[in-house]
Image: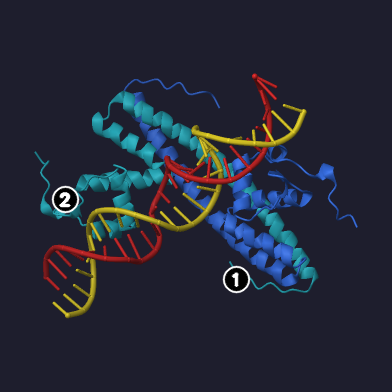
Chain colours: A blue, B cyan, C red, D yellow
Amino acid sequence: VTEDVSDDDLQTIGQMCAAFGVTPRTLRFYEAKELLAPVREGQKRLYTRRCRARLKLILQGKRFGFSLEDIRQLLDLYDIGDQQTTQLARTHTLAVGRLRAMEAQRAELDTAIADLREQIQSSEATLAARGVRLDEAAE
Amino acid sequence: VTEDVSDDDLQTIGQMCAAFGVTPRTLRFYEAKELLAPVREGQKRLYTRRCRARLKLILQGKRFGFSLEDIRQLLDLYDIGDQQTTQLARTHTLAVGRLRAMEAQRAELDTAIADLREQIQSSEATLAARGVRLDEAAE
DNA sequence: CACACTATAACGATGCGTGAGAGTGG
DNA sequence: TCCACTCTCACGCATCGTTATAGTGT
């Protein structure tokens, strides 16, 4: 099998951080929350290929706004049954819900941006009326 | 002066919560953070018209993504000098910075939404290939 | 010896939620 | 007496950042 972990597959915490743009604290935190389970060499953590795959999924999940607890459960689903249909369906349902939430958030953000633009313009009008010159960096 | 506070101007915490859609805990928290300073009648808090104006600004600020600490400083600015030009200019600068951040956040959110849509579609393809029928509520 | 990297432990920040237990007024 | 409302602690949650302190290896 190709299941044995060759040494070059193992990365230290520092290498992982450089590769994924996170801090050691973050990786240790994910481990404490049982999202990652690196092997140990003495005290030191060594991250396998599987750890890397999981971390990638974790960071994806976070971009989508899932909580770490949500992500943990999703990862567990993937671990237990290899692509069982019921589990794919479940993940799908959660993803659709998240998408709805993100779209709602986007709508709110849009109106907030519009409102803030208005406020800024009115304050600029006030300042201009007082002869204040605004030197903003060109966009 | 019209500076005296007539009794009908005072609202209890419950009335404030109903009016602004927040919880008592939230109002007490804002008070602990020195964003609000209701008067007291014995133990009970009574919110003046000024409190309401401040709370409105606080909630606006939060929509714009300012931290409570940012908001506190901005409110203090407004309190100290009545519409001094330098303070308006300072607020303006912060607002422009916030707007930039919100626009950046919106861009990230957009790509995240697009990515999640892709993932959902591919999982739908997989499920469909397995003969799974997805019954989603019509939009 | 020095220097880089790693480890654990524990406190801090943010913005409240969620009780527990007690008082107050009608 | 009971109900509704209010009060003050004070711990909990999520997601790490930030020291402090101490190895470990080269």
Can residue B27 be seen here? The reply is: yes
Q: Residues within 10 Å of mark 2 (few under 14, many from 20)?
A: few
Q: CA distance from mark 1 to mark 2?
A: 51 Å
Which label belongs to residue B40? 2
Which label belongs to residue B115? none
Judged by depth in the image, the label closer to the viewer, 1 or 2, is 2
| x and y percentages locating residue B77 in the rendered image | 30, 31
Specify the subunit that label 1 lies on: B
Q: Residue type at mark 1: give it.
A: Ala
Q: Secondary structure at mark 2?
A: strand
Specify the subunit that label 2 lies on: B
- On the picture, is B98 further left or further right than B119? left
| x and y percentages locating residue A6 in the rendered image | 85, 47
| x and y percentages locating residue A26 in the rendered image | 60, 44
| Residue under the image location 33 percent in, 58 percent down | B23
Which label belongs to residue B137? 1
| x and y percentages locating residue D12 in the rendered image | 45, 58
Q: Which residue is outermost to the left?
A: B1
Question: Which residue is at the front of the view, B91 or A92?
Answer: A92
Question: Which residue is at the front of the view, A63 or A121?
Answer: A63
| Residue under the image location 69 percent in, 53 percent down | A37
- Quadrant containing the C terminus of chain B is bottom right
Q: Residue type at mark 2: give it.
A: Arg
Q: Secondary structure at mark 1?
A: loop
**Can you tell which quarter of the image residue B125 is in?**
bottom right
- Quadrant containing the N terminus of chain B is top left
- On the picture, is A28 further left or further right than B10? right
| Residue under the image location 63 percent in, 59 percent down | A72
